Image (cartoon, helix red, strand yellow):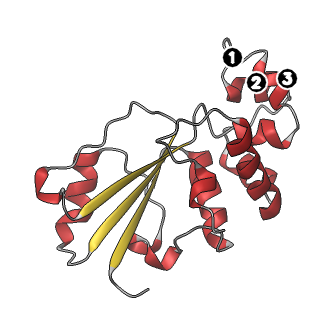
């Protein structure tokens, strides 16, 4: 790391954290663990708490915050003092990160029949018989093969209706 820019990676939930950590461990993201604040994926979702906990350390360099989340409406407003020092980039996994499991299982088309009435995680639980789909150990074991995970992420970008101004996980993968 050249020290010119620090990166904070904040994940909304357990599954997102598992997936981002796997991608970091395999050097598949456009940033590395060594570039991260405290060299770890953060759990802090509240801008004020993040600001107080991490930005008060007096960093001289700019900070890019990657927020991995499934909500397009979740607000993350830092105070004006950080407006020119912190770049916040939202990486949207809508509707849920469990869509990667559905895609990997080859059930994306089938899920489309249910998407207006059932969340992806519930589809995995009820239709794919994966009751532990939200569990850390399940996601960790399910995506044991990094190529399977990367392929599901890339397929998601091809299949999903991603808003033109949004980034998804595929956008932060190395080329």
Location of residue 18 (image quadrant): bottom right
**Element type at marker 3?**
helix
Q: Residue 95: which quarter of the image?
A: top right
Q: Are marks 2 and 1 in contact (CB under 8 Å)?
A: yes
Residue 145 percent across, percent down from the top left: 82, 62
Residue tagged 1: 118
Which residue is under mark 3? 110
For marks 3 and 1, give the CA distance: 12 Å
* Furthest residue in direction right, as rendered: 106
What is the spatial separation of the Cα atoms under label 3 and label 2, in whole angstroms?
10 Å
**On the rendered structure, is 83 left or right of 101?**
left
Identify the element where label 2 is drawn.
helix
SS class, disc 1 = loop
In the orientation shown, which residue stands out farthest toward the front? 164
The residue at which mark 2 appears reads as: 123
Q: Residues within 10 Å of mark 1 (few under 14, many from 20)?
A: some
In which quadrant of the rendered view does residue 6 lie? bottom left
Horizontal and vertical percent position of residue 3? 34, 85
Q: Residue at x 22, y 64 (%)?
A: 55
Residue sitting nearer the eye, 139 or 69: 69
The residue under the point 30% across, 43% down is 76
- Tell which circle, 2 or 1, labels the residue nearer the N-terminal end: 1
Residue 73 seen anywhere in this rendered image of the structure: yes
Residue with the most extreme left position: 81
Q: Is residue 174 above or below residue 46?
A: below
């Amino acid at each position: 790391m050249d020290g010119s820019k620090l990166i904070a990676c904040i994940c909304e939930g357990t599954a997102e954290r598992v997936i981002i950590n796997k991608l970091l461990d395999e050097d598949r993201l456009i940033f590395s663990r060594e570039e991260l604040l405290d060299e770890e994926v953060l759990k802090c979702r509240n801008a004020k708490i993040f600001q107080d906990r991490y930005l008060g350390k007096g960093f001289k360099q700019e900070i890019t915050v990657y927020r991995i989340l499934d909500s397009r409406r979740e607000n993350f407003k830092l105070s004006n003092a950080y407006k020119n020092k912190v770049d916040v980039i939202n990486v949207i996994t809508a509707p849920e990160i469990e869509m990667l499991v559905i895609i990997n299982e080859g059930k994306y088309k089938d899920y489309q029949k249910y998407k207006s009435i059932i969340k992806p995680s519930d589809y995995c639980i009820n239709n794919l018989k994966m009751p532990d789909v939200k569990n850390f150990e399940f996601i960790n074991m399910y995506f044991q093969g990094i190529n399977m995970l990367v392929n599901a992420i890339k397929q998601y970008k091809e299949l999903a209706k991603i808003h033109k101004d949004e980034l998804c996980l595929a956008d932060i993968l190395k080329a």
